[in-house]
Amino acid sequence: MRMPRSGSTGPRRRTILAASAAASAFVPLAAGGTAWGAAPDADPYDTLLARAAAQLTGGAFDAADPDFAAALKVLDTQASGWWKDLDRSAGRTALWADLSPAKEPGNFGQSYTRLRTIATAWATPGTSLSDSAETADALLDALRFLHADAYNPSRPESGNWWFWEIGAPRALMDTCVLLREKIAAADLAKYVSAVAKFCPDPDRRTNAPTLSETGANRADKAVIVALRGLLAQDPATLALARDGLSDVRDKGRNSLFTYVTSGDGFYEDGSFVQHGSVAYTGTYGSVLLGSAGQLIALLADSEWAVTDPKTSVLYEAVERTFSPVVFDGLMMDALRGRATSREKAPDHKDGAVTLTNILQLADGAPAAYAARWRALAKGWIRRNTSHPYLGLVGVPALARAKAVLDDDAVPATERLTGHFAFADMDRVVHRRPGWALTLSLSSKRIAAYEAGNGENLHGWYTGDGMAYLYDGDDLGQFGDGFWATVDPYRLPGTTVDTRTRADIGSGGGTGTYVPKNAVAGGAALDDRFGAAAMELLADGSTLRAKKAWFFLDNAVLALGADITASDGRSIETVVENRNLYEDGAPRLTVDGRRQPSRTGWSAPLPGARWAHLDGTGGYVFPDDPAQSSSGRGGARLHALRDERTGAWRDINTGADTGGSTTPVTRRYLTLWLDHGVSPAPSSYAYVLLPGASAAATAVWSHSRPVRVLANNATAQAVEARRHGLVAAHFWQPGSAAGLTASGPCTVIVRRGGDGMSLAVADPGRTGTSVTVELPFAVRKVVSADDTVTVTPGRRPVVTARVEGSRGHTHTAHLR
């Protein structure tokens, strides 16, 4: 390991700033990207360190520009606040009173993060701390204090490993990059040595050497190792960082540039999993995208450049994995795991992080990819006026975004539409021009929730079929105090036992709850229609239910059947629990009659046929064959307007993410169906009509354009005549809607002028093959997957070889 020459404190500050401005890799002047060129005789370490500094400060920018001025003010306010409270006394035991003692992992981890913010302000022209000698001296002294007292090679790991191996070393190395001209060689050697102890390579967990790092953790560690290699001027360490992305050490087993079929990483269907069983596109997936993209850009055009030909997996993930789960710049909460409980990280901020990471990756990606991503980002930024992106990010991200927005050659992509069945992470996303609905499912493969380290204390039902309805005119629904105030026992789409639950995840470490059901997922047809199902085996309860959803152009039908329980408690299915914000009182109409708008109103609405909530849409309660056959007609609907007060601290007490105790109050409109005490069995049927008017909802209820044909323990099926579509989920062999299935499967059939399209899936992954007999004549097969065979005739038979397909859809086009 080669440290700077004795007596040297690194290149002079003006050299760093000049190099940052010249490189300007992260301050592109046009949306087409930036060249990284360096002088032929330039020191490669100085060149790359200047790039690393520019990644943190943004390099050259126009401080007089109002957007940059606003970003500088945010940075300055945060940094100067921590600077003012920094304890600089000789006998201190911590740098900040609220992070005492400094020896605790959470405290030194956050201390390094605050020092990085102060150092960034010091290194960024235009802040009150810019180039301050007093600030630089205090930062150097603070680094020496933390090394001596808290984070050094002589200390064994304790508490949360992440602070030791990722959180603290990343912030420390970033700070050293910014202050490297000021840090004495001996001190720099100590800091590099500490990081080398706890993060020696990207491949292994230091406190558990047999555990290989995967996904976001591997990407984060690769960046840390690269920065350590640059500061130490050690080519072997830089090669180790680069090779960590591809997992050269283990022959690519945990490469970030490969599709996985189990465990952590990117899947070909667009899924992303971390921690073995958690759908985590929105946080860990985004972190992987950001860190890998940063390292690719950092090492570009150097002898350590990333040249793995499979980097296309990362590039393809932007549109395959991330784009479907970002709605006008919001990251969908169904993909954020325990991060939904973080007060300082609502959906629009995690969405902004993902957008930032995509634009960063575009700087070094092939032109065709980069052009599409910039257009995608431009559309997101323009449509989200509720939480403007330019006000959420710092100088480096701001520079990229403004270059895109100012470039007339970059079009703004329209809102994505389509149906996306992410079989490998038990998520379903249905997107229409004005709205989107996301289902959060779970199974013995994918966790119902993750909690731990004090986070996500009330996440009990988030994976039990929660339905997130996103409206293009209501972008604050889940990001405006929702998780701190919503009734966690009544999440939209879920069927629940009303028992009282204890907090989860309040101890150290993180854990998941993985249920025992096999069925979760469904089929997609023509990228437009979908059907999904989930068997509910409730945690800690005898509650059992068979749940299904059917997705059409303007409607989502939800069916529940075979709902049973024997614990002596009421069972409910939640149709809606809409955040009305601080003072909202939108009109609720039921069967044409306006209901009271006062907070605290509640009422049973037996026999309701339809309801409408202004600003959200309609709800229809069609005839349910299961209820009709039992002589129980009409929906057992209940409604409630209430005002709920909570605090973010109630759901997150984490060391570095814990919420405040400040009361938060929001109003809600809740609609639910009451199945009674210990039902045996019960069912439900309702339709969501997002964005529909009250008149359109009434017409829909009267005309019944979609009929429920079956809703029982054998099958749940619907028919949409206008679309020529029949869809069913079979729980066992049987017949419904004219279809006959040999075993469990999801089937969608649509007839039109160009023939018949068909989709089949086995979301339970229990079968080898499944046959479906159709009620329509078929003369020939136009096209079919190689897993599908068809016997034409008046009663054609379709056979799908589902074994090994992991619940994915098999399709055919027939005539």
Image (cartoon, rainbow, N blue to C red):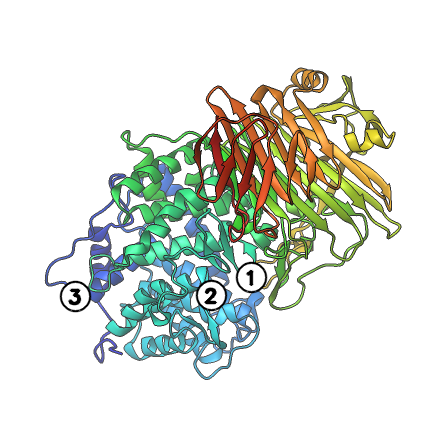
Q: Earlier in the sequence, mark 2 or mark 1?
A: 2
- Considering the numbered disc 3 on the image, is that residue within a helix, a strand or a loop? loop
Tell me if 673 is positioned left or right of 813 in this view. right
Q: Secondary structure at mark 1?
A: loop
Extreme bottom residue here?
154
Q: Which mark is residue 392?
A: none
Q: Residue 405 placed where, x, y %?
A: 34, 34
The label nearer to you, 2 versus 1, is 2
* Drawn side of residue 77 relative to residue 471, left or right: left
Residue 535 in sight in this render: yes
Query: Camera-side residue: 182 or 231?
Result: 231
Q: Which labelled disc corresponds to residue 167?
A: 2
User: Residue placed at 77% from the left, 58% from the top?
Assistant: 540
On the image, the x and y values in percent for residue 795 come to 59, 29
- Quick check: 393 left or right of 673? left
CB within 8 Å, label 3 to label 1: no
Between the residue at mark 3 and the residue at mark 1, the CA separation in whole angstroms equals 38 Å
The amino acid pointed to by label 2 is Gly
Residue that label 1 marks:
656
Coordinates of residue 397 in the picture (x, y in percent)? 36, 46
Mark 3 Cα shell of 10 Å, populated few (<14), some (14-19), many (≥20): few
Label 2 close to label 1 by CB (< 8 Å): yes
Q: Is residue 675 left or right of residue 107?
A: right
Question: Is label 3 in contact with label 2 (beta carbons under 8 Å)?
Answer: no
Instruction: Say what amino acid the circle numbered 1 marks.
Output: Asp
Mark 1 nearby-residue class (10 Å; few <14, some 14–19, many ≥20): some
Disc 3 or 2, which lies upstream in sequence? 3
Q: Position of residue 487 (x, y in %)?
A: 73, 44
Q: Quadrant of the N terminus?
A: bottom left
The residue at which mark 3 appears reads as: 43
